Amino acid sequence: MTRQAVVLLSGGLDSTTCAAQARADGFELLALTIDYNQRHRVELDAAARAAERFEARRHVVLPLDLSAFGGSALTSDMEVPKGEGEVDDSQIPSTYVPARNTVFLSVALAFAEASRARDIYIGVNALDYSGYPDCRPAFIKAFEDLAAQATKAGTEGDRFQVHTPLIDLDKAGIATLARQLGVDAGETWTCYDPVEKGGQVLHCGRCDACRLRHKGFVEAGLPDPTAYA
Amino acid sequence: MTRQAVVLLSGGLDSTTCAAQARADGFELLALTIDYNQRHRVELDAAARAAERFEARRHVVLPLDLSAFGGSALTSDMEVPKGEGEVDDSQIPSTYVPARNTVFLSVALAFAEASRARDIYIGVNALDYSGYPDCRPAFIKAFEDLAAQATKAGTEGDRFQVHTPLIDLDKAGIATLARQLGVDAGETWTCYDPVEKGGQVLHCGRCDACRLRHKGFVEAGLPDPTAYA
């Protein structure tokens, strides 16, 4: 039987590349998309396309709205920072969602244990998101240690492994890996602040995520297939 | 300023007693109810009553339906075990929901960090639920270690504390503590399998949770105020 892995799939370039890596590693995919706010419906469509392309065994879209708690530009009414001058790289960015990856990995663990899968893929990277505490290897290790205590399978001696194939890559490295794995980057979605124009939903080209995405393609010497507003 | 604590509040006897303990410890409550399946709406009403009685600063009811993953009698179509003969105490019970407390504590951590609270209360107990891996002190410790790595506050040196005032109590101990703290046990909800009768929703009196609950009152020498079917 083909081994299965739960893959957190947002529909962005990072998670789609991560899913492609899981396929390349020989896993059948259990795709998991967290619908954690109402801002980016266009991401959900991108996730569904990717799950279909990777022939996921299942694709679960789980509504989980952390915005009830407040505390982040991504899930509350705070302004998304734009432009070089407004982003202070020495600080934890205001787009940081408290405990987001902890929640995402916990739900992935629930999916994995219920499906008898022992592998989880998450497309975090420690370089471009150095301000996010839950994108660091120490966090991933602590989560694996927790999983060993938290589950029936773990207490019976199975080890859950959290795979982070992008953790040491910068955006250029991710763009390059995406191309190597045959990911259609133009089908992925990154923008925090989509713009509607002429009946189409476009990447804004100005938010933190768009800037990192574009910089990645440029630094990798690859064409940027993104439609910006 | 009064310190705040996030309290996971299901509306059951355990979590309501846990909330009462948090109040007795001097915290203002941020009550968090996870609406994780559609079976027990009556629990949500009990949680809302408790949040009001404890003058919670906020009460967030978060829809989070783990039944999409399957794997448990509580969140899927599997039969809830009933009667002495069907419950095998040496096994992890079929009512175990994979990674449930991991998911609940993760969401509580998100709420806590967003609210600048550093304390979380959860009404797990290691005795009567000895089969649940995520009700053990080793699990709680692993979660605190994770929280230190997972959050902005944690990496800046703050320690999140997970309080488990019921962890060493059996059901009789919980019934006694509930009485000491002035909890109206008749207002709490425990049953896994509610019964509608004459326009009322009643505890079934037969499921694992009902049996443990009743046994607790009996062993504590207290009247059982529960309305059973």
Image (cartoon, coloured by chain):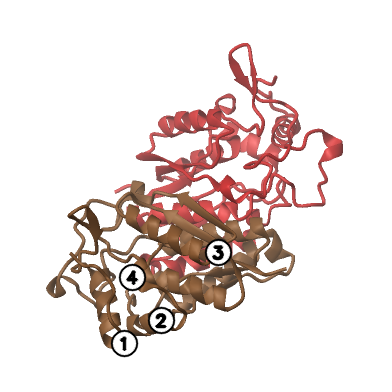
Chain colours: A brown, B red
- Tell me the CA gap for discs 3 and 4: 19 Å
Q: Which residue is mark 1?
A: A220
CB atoms of marks 2 and 1 within 8 Å: yes
* Dot 1: chain letter: A
Quick one: label 3 or label 4, which is nearer the N terminus? 3
Q: Helix or strand or loop: what does disc 2 sit on?
A: helix
The kind of residue on which mark 4 rests is Gly
* Dot 2: chain letter: A
Q: Which residue is mark 4?
A: A186
Quick one: label 1 or label 3, which is nearer the N terminus? 3
Q: Which quarter shows the C terminus of chain B?
A: top right
Q: Helix or strand or loop: what does disc 3 sit on?
A: loop
Q: Which residue is mark 3?
A: A55
Q: Are marks 2 and 3 on the same chain?
A: yes
Labels 1, 4: front one: 4
Q: Observer-nearest residue: B29 or A81?
A: A81
* Dot 4: chain letter: A
Quick one: label 2 or label 4, which is nearer the N terminus? 2
The kind of residue on which mark 2 rests is Arg
Q: Residue at x 37, y 67 (%)?
A: A12
Q: Which residue extends farthest front? A: A198
Residue A94 as seen in the image, left or right of residue B164: left
Q: Observer-nearest residue: A125 or A192?
A: A192
Q: Which residue is mark 2?
A: A179
- Tell me the CA gap for discs 1 and 3: 28 Å
